[in-house]
Image (cartoon, coloured by chain):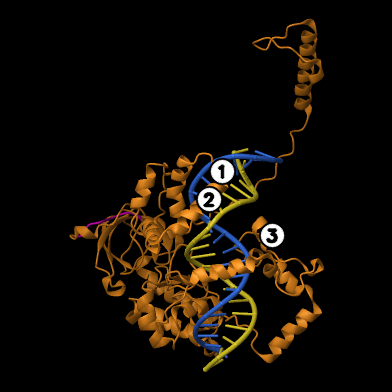
Chain colours: A orange, B yellow, C blue
DNA sequence: CCCCGATGTTACATGCAAAG
DNA sequence: CTTTGCATGTAACATCGGGG
């Protein structure tokens, strides 16, 4: 068709008879194609894409904030720069900043977490239109005090001052759903206290313990057959139900002498978290399924030195990891383990196993024999991206980035020094390590940590 | 429309080795 | 066995162009 050099008049109308013939042929083939598709089975449906798991956004780094703010300005002043060149320019500009200037971006970053829009964000709002933030999910409140609560009710909550050490505060919330146990979801909280400075935006009633002060407006029936009973939850019976559940647990898993094998570290940790004397430093989360180190400095100063002999905060975190604890996403200083809960029993703690490196002679020999029996084991450990070992991470090994860092298999002659050493990356690593030591110390690890103990 | 690459930094997770 | 230091890997951040 292209060789026929069809000439079309403006408006798409062919000029000559040959063009008319061509049009007729094309139209006929179009009609035939349509007719054939009518009788054909529909094309096979594309396989459904894997369901994307919502990712929780971590805190943006100071450098990210810096780029967010500076990138538009660099692009505006140098429109000819490619995107990678802009990134390079950003890196150069970041390197020229003093520690104080970098810290200011970190401060902005912190503001972003604590107090809503920061000065930097407001400044950037003129450049980039921010997306509307999704409505925050209802907060879960723990209830004690034995007052009956129904869905739809408006209740007046009182923060527990004696446990949290915070100023007592009263709030009005709407109960949206009875969760069972001793918690319910609540929205629309607003402060009703005299202290105006203690105001807190709706929906941000958070954490520790709250007790029901008064049911202001019970939105459902009063005869007791409210929706909350669907879960079998009766707030005034909650303590009794908890005891009954504990008894059932005991029947299923008799304690026996198992408690004697619980790790001393876990036993101490459980005592510390449960003790009210250390509530200023470490507490249970509101659901009782994770520990919250609210004040790392106080925790290191008052708790670690007293209860964990010469254990620095960094080592404490490492010990948590060794026992299988995980950090809660987006929650600094909050760790959880499925068996380590406020309502855990001693035999439950004993089921938490500590991961130890092969320390004994026999274990070392076993390890060596295993490597000898299966020489590719070491290669497997290297070849297998850690993302595959960690079930919660991506399965593709990080794409080209991981492929670039992945060592060559032995068949490619990767015997002797680590391949990184031959690529100059080792020098880069040394440089990074040197620059890392110059950073401000971080109490949570990674950087040189003052041994507060 | 979607995905990938490029850019530098940070936080986090984990393995290994050494010392006590 | 405990504690610690060091090394390493990975994901995430924002943004644009290019390719399928």
Q: Earlier in the sequence, mark 2 or mark 3?
A: 2
Quadrant housing the C terminus of chain A: bottom left
Contact between marks 3 and 1 (CB within 8 A): the answer is no
Q: Tag 2: Cα neighbours inside 10 Å, few (<14), some, or many (≥20)?
A: some
Residue A79 placement (x, y as % from top left): 50, 39
Rendered residue at 68%/65% (across/down)? A423
Vertical comparison of A55 with C2: above or below: above
For the magenta stretch, what is the residue range?
A187-193
Q: Which residue is mark 2?
A: A87
SS for dot 1: loop
Q: Tag 1: Cα neighbours inside 10 Å, few (<14), some, or many (≥20)?
A: few
Q: Earlier in the sequence, mark 1 or mark 2?
A: 1
Host chain of mark 1: A
Q: Visible in this render: residue A60?
A: no
Q: Which residue is mark 1?
A: A82
Q: Which mark is residue A403?
A: 3
As for residue A258 lying within the magenta part, the answer is no
> Spatial distance from mark 2 to mark 3, Cα to Cα?
22 Å
> Spatial distance from mark 1 to mark 2, Cα to Cα?
9 Å
SS for dot 2: helix
Marks 3 and 1 on same chain: yes
Name the magenta segment's main secondary structure.
strand
């Amino acid at each position: 068709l292209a060789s026929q050099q069809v000439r079309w008049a403006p408006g798409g109308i062919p000029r000559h008879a040959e063009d008319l013939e061509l049009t007729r042929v094309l139209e006929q083939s179009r009609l035939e194609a349509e007719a054939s598709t009518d009788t054909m089975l529909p094309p096979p449906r594309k396989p459904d894409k894997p369901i994307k798991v919502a990712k929780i956004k971590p805190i943006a780094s100071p450098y990210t904030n810096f780029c967010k703010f500076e990138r538009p300005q660099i692009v505006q002043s140098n429109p000819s720069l490619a995107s990678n060149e802009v990134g390079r320019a950003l890196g150069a500009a970041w390197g020229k900043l003093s520690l104080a200037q970098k810290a200011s971006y970190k401060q902005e970053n912190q503001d972003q977490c604590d107090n809503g829009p920061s000065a930097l964000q407001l400044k950037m709002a003129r450049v980039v239109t921010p997306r509307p933030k999704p409505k925050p999910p209802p907060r879960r409140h723990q209830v004690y005090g034995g007052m009956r609560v129904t869905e739809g009710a408006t209740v007046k909550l009182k923060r527990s001052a004696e446990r949290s050490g915070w100023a007592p505060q009263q709030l009005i919330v709407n109960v949206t759903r009875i969760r069972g146990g001793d918690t319910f979801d609540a929205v629309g909280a607003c402060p009703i206290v005299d202290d105006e400075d203690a105001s807190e935006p709706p929906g941000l009633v958070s954490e520790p313990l709250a007790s029901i002060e008064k049911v202001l407006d019970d939105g459902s029936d009063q005869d007791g057959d409210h929706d909350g009973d669907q879960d079998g939850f009766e707030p005034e019976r909650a303590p009794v139900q908890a005891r009954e559940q504990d008894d059932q647990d005991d029947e299923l898993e008799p304690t026996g002498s198992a408690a004697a094998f619980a790790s001393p570290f876990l036993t101490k940790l459980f005592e510390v978290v449960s003790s009210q004397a250390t509530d200023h430093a470490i507490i249970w989360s509101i659901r009782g399924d994770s520990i919250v180190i609210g004040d790392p400095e106080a925790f290191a100063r008052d708790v670690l030195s007293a209860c964990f002999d010469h254990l620095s905060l960094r080592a404490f975190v490492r010990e948590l990891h060794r026992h299988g604890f995980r950090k809660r996403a987006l929650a600094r200083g909050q760790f959880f383990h499925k068996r380590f809960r406020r309502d855990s029993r001693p035999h439950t703690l004993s089921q938490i196993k500590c991961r130890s490196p092969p320390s004994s002679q026999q274990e070392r020999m076993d390890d060596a024999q295993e490597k000898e029996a299966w020489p590719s084991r070491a290669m497997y450990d290297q070849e297998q991206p850690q993302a595959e070992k960690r079930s919660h991470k991506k399965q593709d090994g990080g794409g080209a980035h991981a492929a670039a860092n992945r060592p060559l298999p032995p068949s490619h002659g990767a015997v002797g020094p680590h391949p990184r050493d031959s690529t100059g990356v080792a020098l880069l690593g040394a440089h990074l390590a040197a620059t890392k030591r110059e950073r401000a110390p971080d109490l949570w690890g990674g950087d040189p940590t003052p041994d507060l103990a």
